[in-house]
Image (cartoon, rainbow, N blue to C red):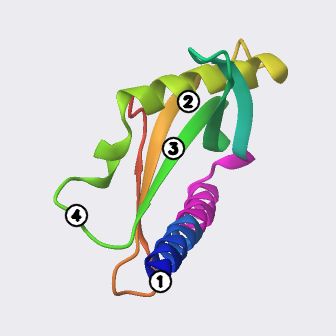
Amino acid sequence: MESNIKDTDTARRNKSALGRAGEIAAARYLEGVGMKILAMNFTAPIGRNRKNTSVMGEIDIIAIDQGSVRFVEVKTRAQVGMLPIETSVTLRKRRNIEKTAKVFKRIFNLGGRGAGFDVVTVLYGSDTEPEIRLIPDFW
């Protein structure tokens, strides 16, 4: 029984490391296409749940592209699945990102700037370099 717990913990750590590697690769990609990275893994309180516990929102990457603030969700996978990677950006996730983006814009007085919500998919296959795809204005 104990070995299953260890296997689960290892898988969770590996998934976390994969996600972090994907975010770093995505940030480098965005810089390569001319975006300026403002923040990574920005977190802020966005409300309270039914149990009156504070709910935190997170945005993977916040960047500036041609004067527009871009709020970027990064999705990383180690293998191709049945569905496109971006389908895992659910309505609930999009709403949380939108709320977090409002907090970011308010804190940094960016209310007058244009903004958009993008997705970057990162696929680590058998190649050493990941396949990275930017989907601008995903929602």
Q: Label 3, on which residue? A: 73
Residue 97 in percent (x, y) is at 55, 29
Q: Label 2, on which residue? A: 97
Residue 30 in percent (x, y) is at 58, 55
- Mark with earlier residue (3, 1): 1
Q: Which of labels 4 and 1 is toward the front?
A: 1
Range covered by the magenta-colored residues: 19-40
Question: Mark 3 falls on what kind of element?
Answer: strand
Q: Given the image, on which type of amino acid does mark 2 rest?
A: Ile
Q: Label 1, on which residue? A: 3
Residue plotted at (19% across, 53% down): 83
| Residue count near mark 1 (Cα–Cα under 10 Å), binned few <14, some 14–19, many ≥20 | few
Q: CA distance from mark 4 to mark 2?
A: 24 Å
Residue plotted at (64% across, 31% down): 69
Q: Quadrant of residue 70?
A: top right
Q: CA distance from mark 3 to mark 1?
A: 34 Å
Which image quarter is the N terminus in? bottom left
- Mark with earlier residue (4, 1): 1
Q: CA distance from mark 4 to mark 1?
A: 27 Å
- Mark with earlier residue (4, 3): 3
**Residue 19, label in figure:** none
Q: CA distance from mark 1 to mark 2?
A: 37 Å
- Residue 35 versus residue 14: which sits nearer the camera? 14
- Mark with earlier residue (3, 2): 3
Q: Label 4, on which residue? A: 81
- Residue 138 versus residue 15: which sits nearer the camera? 15
Mark 3 in CB contact with mark 2 (< 8 angstroms): yes
